[in-house]
């Protein structure tokens, strides 16, 4: 049984912004926790990653420890809440950028009413 962690299932650079929301986690812990938060079971993750089930259990246990939670539900909650807050902040950022790029057109429309 190898303790080596296999290469990622997906390109983590594609979700780098999500990765930045979880600075406490190693890239492996993030990938495993992310897959778990999307609904994959620990067994499914072990098969997908071609690693022993115990490796997945260990990485999830370390992630839970870093977030100071004892349960899988706690880990899921932390992941979901942070991802929702990230999505809301991105919506706000994009909305602000769009408003700024409209060159005051929104203000003129309000003034005409």
Image (cartoon, rainbow, N blue to C red):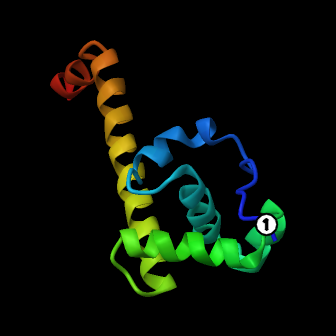
Label 1 neighbour load within 10 Å: few <14, some 14-19, many 20+: some
Q: Nearer the viewer, residue 24 or 75?
A: 24
Q: Quadrant of residue 53?
A: bottom right
Quadrant for the C terminus, please: top left
Q: Residue at x 36, y 71 (%)?
A: 67
Q: Is residue 74 left or right of residue 101?
A: right
Quadrant, the N terminus? bottom right
Above or below: residue 97 compared with residue 31: above
Q: Does 18 sit above or below residue 73?
A: above
Label 1: which residue? Answer: 51
The residue at the point 51 percent across, 83 percent down is: 72
Q: Position of residue 85 (x, y in %)?
A: 35, 56
1 above or below 102?
Answer: below
Which residue is rendered at x = 39% and y = 41% of the image?
Answer: 90
Q: Position of residue 29 (x, y in %)?
A: 55, 60
Which residue: 82% across, 63% down?
A: 48
Image quadrant assignment for residue 82: bottom left
| Residue furthest top in the image | 103
């Amino acid at each position: 049984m190898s303790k080596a962690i296999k290469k990622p299932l997906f390109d983590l650079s594609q979700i780098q912004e999500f990765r930045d929301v979880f600075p406490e986690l190693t890239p492996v812990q993030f990938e495993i926790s992310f897959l778990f938060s999307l609904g994959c079971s620990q067994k499914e993750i072990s098969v997908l990653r071609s690693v022993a089930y115990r490796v997945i259990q260990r990485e999830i246990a370390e992630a839970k420890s870093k977030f100071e939670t004892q349960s899988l539900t706690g880990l899921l909650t932390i992941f979901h809440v942070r991802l929702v807050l990230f999505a809301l902040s991105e919506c706000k950022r994009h909305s602000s950028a769009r408003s700024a790029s409209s060159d005051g057109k929104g203000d003129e429309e309000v003034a005409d009413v």
